[in-house]
Amino acid sequence: MSRVYNFSAGPAVLPEEVLREAAEEMMDYRGSGMSVMEMSHRSKMFETIIGEAEADLRDLLAIPDNYKVLFLQGGASQQFAMVPMNLFKNRVGDYIITGQWAKKAYQEAKLYGTANAVASSADKTFSYIPDVSDLPISDDADYVYICENNTIYGTKFKTLPNTKGKTLVADLSSCFLSEPIDISKYGLIFAGAQKNVGPAGVVIAIIREDLITEDVLPGTPTMLRYKTHADEKSLYNTPPAYGIYICGKVFKWLKNRGGLEAMKEFNEKKAAILYDYLDQSQMFTGTVVEKDRSLMNVPFVTGNEELDALFVKESKAAGFENLKGHRSVGGMRASIYNAMPIEGVEKLVAFMKDFETKHGK
Ligand SMILES: *Cc1c(COP(=O)(O)O)cnc(C)c1O
């Protein structure tokens, strides 16, 4: 068996320990004689799996008691609709546009009411985070919306916007559990699992209880109401059971590694190896303003499209997968989520140095 270093933005690398454990339990989960994939979601055994997953997640993030944890489906993209459908009372949402995902959420909200773009970094190809200390927040805004880590452009909010008392809603898909956060600053966060915590098919939403109401937009399907899932503890219908089981294993893996403070330290150290090299390279440059750099997604370019293509090709042959940048921006992008080992980044940088020596001026 040989494993590559997988720099994919998502679905992405998972901890080897987790994959190995799942493989061992595949045919017979703890004496049940079946795989978790084959198990009733109403069984005692699965109840324990989902219960422990939630408890471990609450522990990791120190989630206050007045927040619900929901395991949903439909991808992060479905949240772009669920957020306005459930939170629109005045039918006004203020959006900070820092990339494709924020823009998609903004456009989706327009289907249901007024979405205001209160700030944007589109003028410089989303290579920075706008100043969010004093935005023109609408008096009647139901919430202020951000995409906290921009997977495609490699930027991250280092300070949260001043929402002037409005509820903060955040898409954390690509930075979820990469560092500690203060949940009480948010009304609602959500994250697709396939970036940093598990397989595609699970979306985790953490939502303050007062935002879970029956007062949703008329016509909101039962399945798209937070209340439906909150009332039934994510078991209103069949949840993405196997995915939740893997997420649960990742939560335990994170706890064993010392939790999110330790993860933050590890991720900072790991990202610095790559950024430090980019900052002194004559060939490669990072595309993001230094203060707004993401710890998870690192885009870079050579400034020459042919050289970029050659780099992607040669790196793949050397065992570094998925370094091609997003189709909308080109260049390269290394996604270095929690499960990417430090050796992966060290070896990538060594490979880049060699490439630079070989192809540089
Ligand atoms: C990947 C991604 C999405 C879309 O996720 P899906 O699960 O494919 O819908 C949304 N937001 C962010 C920040 C992402 O990285």
Image (cartoon, grey):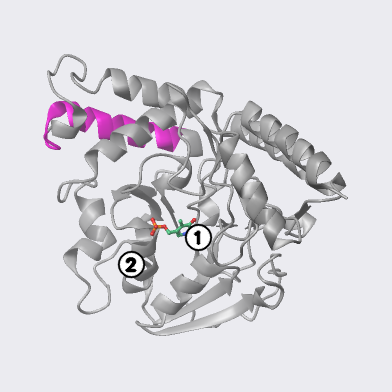
* Residue 248 drawn above or below residue 110: above
Q: Residues within 10 Å of mark 1 (few under 14, many from 20)?
A: many
Q: Is mark 2 within 8 Å of ligand 1?
A: no
Residue 158 visible in the displayed image: no
Q: Locate residue 181 relative to residue 73 in the image: left or right.
A: right
The amino acid marked with disc number 1 is Ala
* Quarter where residue 316 is shown: top right
Spatial separation of the CA atoms under disc 2 and disc 1: 13 Å
Can you give x and y, in whole percent of width and height, for residue 42 in the image?
Answer: 12, 36
Do labels 2 and 1 touch, CB within 8 Å?
Answer: no
Residue at the spot x=52%, y=77% of the render? 94
Which residue lies under the disc numbered 2?
Answer: 82
- Indicate whether 94 appears above or below 342: below
Residue nearer the viewer, 254 or 60: 254
Specify the amino acid type for callout 2.
Met
Horizontal side of 191 relative to 155 (left or right) equals left
Query: What segment is highlighted magenta in the picture?
Result: 40-59
Question: Which residue, given by chain and number where applicable, does mark 1 sit on?
Answer: 170
